[in-house]
Image: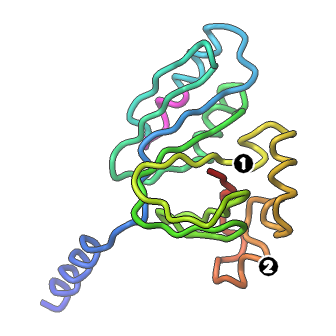
Amino acid sequence: MRKIITMLVVMLVGLTLTTDAQFKKASLQAAGLTCAMCTKAINKALEQVPFVQDVKVDIKTSSFLVNFKEGQAVDFDAMKKAVEDAGFSVAKLKVTGDFNKVDIQNDTHVQIDGKTFHFLNISKQTLEGEKVITLVDKDFVSAKEYKKYSTASSKACVKTGKAQSCCTKEGIAADARIYHVTI
């Protein structure tokens, strides 16, 4: 009986938890494409990612419009790996999320949908409704753009993408993945 009550409590708690955001879609621009076969290879790789619902290709901009499955956790590194496994690299990744009163400010870490985001070059604001954030980690932008954003903070996590002493002081687990983003 005790096990049943415990399971019911856990299920009820799980139902009442809310997230600050649900990531719905992304625009991923790939680098290194030279032909339609390249586009097809990336498209096929992205479609194999478990949380991806569907992919639409914009050949003119070498972009892939990716819709995510509702309620599933999104892993940006898995998307990058799929593109790299197809033989290419990510030139830009913009992610659209549906935010629910998420307060952000420049050069700070924020937990969103189970991930840690470090906002760079932004003004203090509250994210509400559908918003687009751009990942600016070194494997998600050009070297020139990464340099611009990496100098926007003195925190060591910008260089590594992993929690450093600057982050662990805020209660973030050592070596946890930190996504550096801007709006």
Residue appearing at x 85%, y 48% in the figure: 148
CA neighbours of label 1 inside 10 A, class few (<14), some (14 to 19), many (20+): many
- Asked which secondary structure carries label 2, the reply is helix
SS state under label 1: loop
Estimate the x, y position of residue 139 in percent, counting from the top left: 75, 43
The residue that disc 2 covers is 165
Q: Earlier in the sequence, mark 2 or mark 1?
A: 1
Hey, what amino acid is under mark 1? Val
In the image: residue 131, left or right of residue 3: right
Give the colouring mode of the picture: rainbow
* Residue mark closest to the camera, 2 vs 1: 1
Viewer-nearest residue: 132 or 44? 132
158 on left or right of 76: right
Q: Which residue is mark 1?
A: 136
Q: Could you tell me if the residues under marks 2 and 1 are in contact, i.e. CB atoms within 8 Å? A: no
Residue at 66% x, 48% y is 135
Q: Quadrant of residue 39?
A: top right
Q: Which residues are magenta?
A: 45-51
Q: Say which quarter of the image contains residue 143.
A: top right
Tell me, yes or no, whether the highlighted magenta stretch contains residue 140.
Answer: no
Residue in view at x 58 percent, y 69 percent = 110
x, y (%) of residue 65?
A: 50, 29
Tell me how far mark 2 sits from mark 1, CA to CA. 21 Å
Q: Amino acid at mark 2?
A: Ser
Q: Quadrant of residue 40?
A: top right
Q: Residues within 10 Å of mark 2 (few under 14, many from 20)?
A: some
